[in-house]
Amino acid sequence: MSSHTLFPQETRVIPTQVIYYPSFDPDERWLRAMLLVTDQVIRIIPNDAGHQDPEYVERLGSVLPGAIVRESPGANDTSLDAVNLQRLSKALSHIRETSSGLDRIEVIVGPGGTIELPGKVWIHESKLSREVSRLLEENELIDDVSTSLVREIGRDDVFVVPAAASDLVLSYVADNIARRLGCNTATDAPIAFAVNALDGLQVHPEGRVRGSLLSAIIQLEIPLEVQTLSAEQYAQLRYSYMDIRGALAEVTTQLSSVHQLSASGNSHVVLQKVLGAAQHFHNECEKFRSAKANRNFTRWIPIGLGGLLTVGAEVIDQPEIAIGAAASCLLINLVQEALRKDTGQRDNVYRQLTDLRRDILNPAHIRSFV
């Protein structure tokens, strides 16, 4: 297993970490937002993948040593027991039966010889156990023609499969690594993807659900302008608000427990609970900001829950109704009573988020630690 060295000045006894999936590199805006509220983002990249980090990852990594790291999946991370193999077989069979265009071969060659396969992706063989590879073959989900084409350009360690099948398998690998390292999983894909990815396996791991809640919170609370800061300004901002990471982790865990996010249920129910908990948190932040009456604070535009449901049509026929149901079905009085036990910690998080957004929108406020 690779070593994950935290930024020396920010080492804490129990670091907050997330396993990123399903691709090698997250969206830059998401990465910056997530690193404001967690110590480390761990990407799943096989040792022999030959992956070159994009420029924005290298730039952030140069000013945040140890904050963006890699983890190569081991044999235990890619394997499934008999019960989950049976579940995966049914889920892959469902993908085969319900997906259209799987037999169509379409290749787009971009600048510099890059290859795009619409609706399909290549998955590194080190992320597949022998049993999982067999299930993909049995369900005719490996595109042999496209795989041969990709291997002709030197990628002889990958298979081309439908994106839905790859997402399902990689979600399971991410959850296994998260359990091994004792952290949550998180994705820059819409929140419905994260919750629904393992619905075919009829499981909703606790680390995945907590990570989904954290992703929803940063979508609502971190302004889009975080991407406009220079790498140096961003590093200074992150250092100034290091205390928010541990505090928000505690509040997120508390919210997950109070709202019973890990309770069994299909993806529709879990999705509603996650969105409801995130909206409840946002509403409490708004109340805090109103009470503080900071009239100099510039209005900001978050991505919002609408952005989190951009694939909602695939999961919920009427996402607007789902959001309304999520808010209305919450036992608000019970939640507020449970959260009232730790008002100081929550107020600390609300205050830091308010100040953090102010500094993102007005970088002149950012304090230099150099």
Image: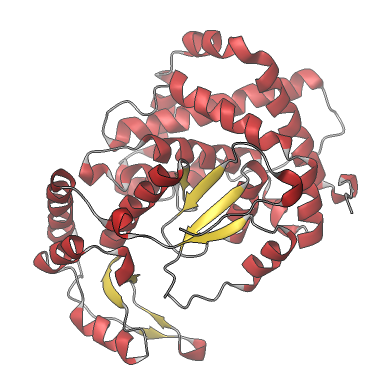
Residue situated furthest left in the rendering: 138
**Could you tell whether 311 is left or right of 286 in the image?**
left
Q: Is residue 252 left or right of residue 58?
A: left
Q: Quadrant of the C terminus?
A: bottom right
Give the residue at x 39% y 19%: 329
269 lies above or below 195? above
| Colour scheme employed for the rendering of this structure | secondary structure
Quick one: 36 or 71, which is closer to the camera?
71
| Residue 204 in view | yes
Q: Position of residue 221 (x, y in %)?
A: 64, 38
Q: Residue at x 13, y 47 (%)?
A: 82
Q: Is residue 336 above or below residue 55?
A: above
Whether residue 141 sits left or right of residue 64 in the image: it is: left
Above or below: residue 272 compared with residue 346: below
Residue depicted at 39% across the width and 31% down the height? 272
Place of residue 292 in the rendered image (x, y in percent of width and height, measured from the top left): 80, 21
Q: How many marks?
A: 0
Determine whether 119 is above or below 150 in the image: above
Q: x and y percent of residue 165 in the render?
A: 25, 60
For residue 309, what is the image quadrant? Answer: top left
Q: Is residue 230 visible?
A: no
Quadrant of the snapshot with the N terminus: bottom left
Report the front residue among 357 and 124: 124
Residue positioned 26% across, 81% down in the render: 147
Residue 189 spot, x, y in % from top left: 45, 53
Between 345 and 270, the one nearer to me in the picture? 345
